[in-house]
Image (spheres, rainbow, N blue to C red):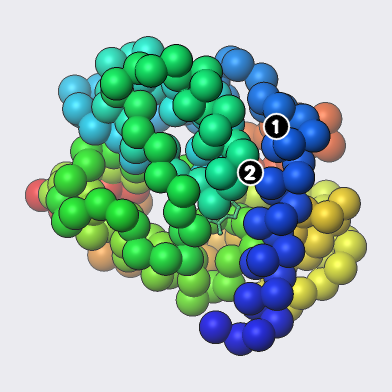
């Protein structure tokens, strides 16, 4: 990894740790709209992996829906808040994990994967491709990946500190704004089921919710 990528990644990890320390439970207790959608898509599944789970509003929702949940994030602080809220629920498993590293799960071991605003963090295009290949490795044949990303139609695209590769830092948070070409390239070898535009928050953040499945 290039030194400047490593510096940015380490700085982002510190920033997220600090953010969760200063604002415990910052995303609230209710599930995100994409998680509610994903729970429907995952109907019949037993095991769900969530990447970038933060303090776990969505992981806890998936557990309430009866799924066994593996929740990953590189923020130990966020995951500690998740474990506290899970209050010993045996369906919830947390893994401190940087999505740039191989996933800590065996091949074909999860039925669904969910990632709300994780792939659009400070990741280079090659790192995003590697992460999606890892998602494919751990999914069962016919399993589904639902992910959301901010895209190049977002008001913050092009604003703030430019880090190259469509990554811009604003208010301390670095975001990789996705182009439609990147979405299509990541879907190669998958069945791309939907690219759904939506918005979230006051800005509002402009996002796509992507649903894609592996072959059976
Ligand atoms: C925008 S927040 C979304 C959190 C959660 N998905 C939600 O919607 O409540 C992005 C999350 O990704 C995590 N994150 C950012 N870069 C990461 C990386 N390289 N590896 C693992 N987690 C990362 C952050 O710690 C943060 O919890």
* Residue denoted by label 1: 200
The residue closer to the viewer here, 104 or 45, is 104
Q: Find residue 120 and report its image quarter.
A: bottom right
Q: Which element type, helix, strand or loop, lies under badge 2? A: strand
The residue closer to the viewer here, 102 or 166, is 102
* Residue denoted by label 2: 207
**Is there any visible trace of residue 86 in the rendered image?**
yes
| Horizontal arrangement in the rendering, residue 133 relative to residue 175 (left or right) | left
Real-space Cα distance between discs 2 and 1?
A: 8 Å
Expressed as whole percent of the image width and height from the top left, the position of residue 153 reads 73, 53
| Horizontal arrangement in the rendering, residue 26 relative to residue 116 (left or right) | right
Instruction: Give the label on residue 41, or none.
Output: none
| Horizontal arrangement in the rendering, residue 162 relative to residue 132 (left or right) | right
- Chain-order first, disc 2 or disc 1: 1
The residue closer to the viewer here, 57 or 207, is 57
**Is there any visible trace of residue 208 in the rendered image?**
no
Quadrant occupied by the N terminus: bottom right
Q: Which element type, helix, strand or loop, lies under badge 1? A: strand
Q: From this view, report whether residue 86 is shown above or below residue 176.
A: above
Residue shown at the point (59%, 37%) measured from the top left: 78
Residue shown at the point (76%, 45%) measured from the top left: 18
Residue shown at the point (37%, 13%) measured from the top left: 64
């Amino acid at each position: 990894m290039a030194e400047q990528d490593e510096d940015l990644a380490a700085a982002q990890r510190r920033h997220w740790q600090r953010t969760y320390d200063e604002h415990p439970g910052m995303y609230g207790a209710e599930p995100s709209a994409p998680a509610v959608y994903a729970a429907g898509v995952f109907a019949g599944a037993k095991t769900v992996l969530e990447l970038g789970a933060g303090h776990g509003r969505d992981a806890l929702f998936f557990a309430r829906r009866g799924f066994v949940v593996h929740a990953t994030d590189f923020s130990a602080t966020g995951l500690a808040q998740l474990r506290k809220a899970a209050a010993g629920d045996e369906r919830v498993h947390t893994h401190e994990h940087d999505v740039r590293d191989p996933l800590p799960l065996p091949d074909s071991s999860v039925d669904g994967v969910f990632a709300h605003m994780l792939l659009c963090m400070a990741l280079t295009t090659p790192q995003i491709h590697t992460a999606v290949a890892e998602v494919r490795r751990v999914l069962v044949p016919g399993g589904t990946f639902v992910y959301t990303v901010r895209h190049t139609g977002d008001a913050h695209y092009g604003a703030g500190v430019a880090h190259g590769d469509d990554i811009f830092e604003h208010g301390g948070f670095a975001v990789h704004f996705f182009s439609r070409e990147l979405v299509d390239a990541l879907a190669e070898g998958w069945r791309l089921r939907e690219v759904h535009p939506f918005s979230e928050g006051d800005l509002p953040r402009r996002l796509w919710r992507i649903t894609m499945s592996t072959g059976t």
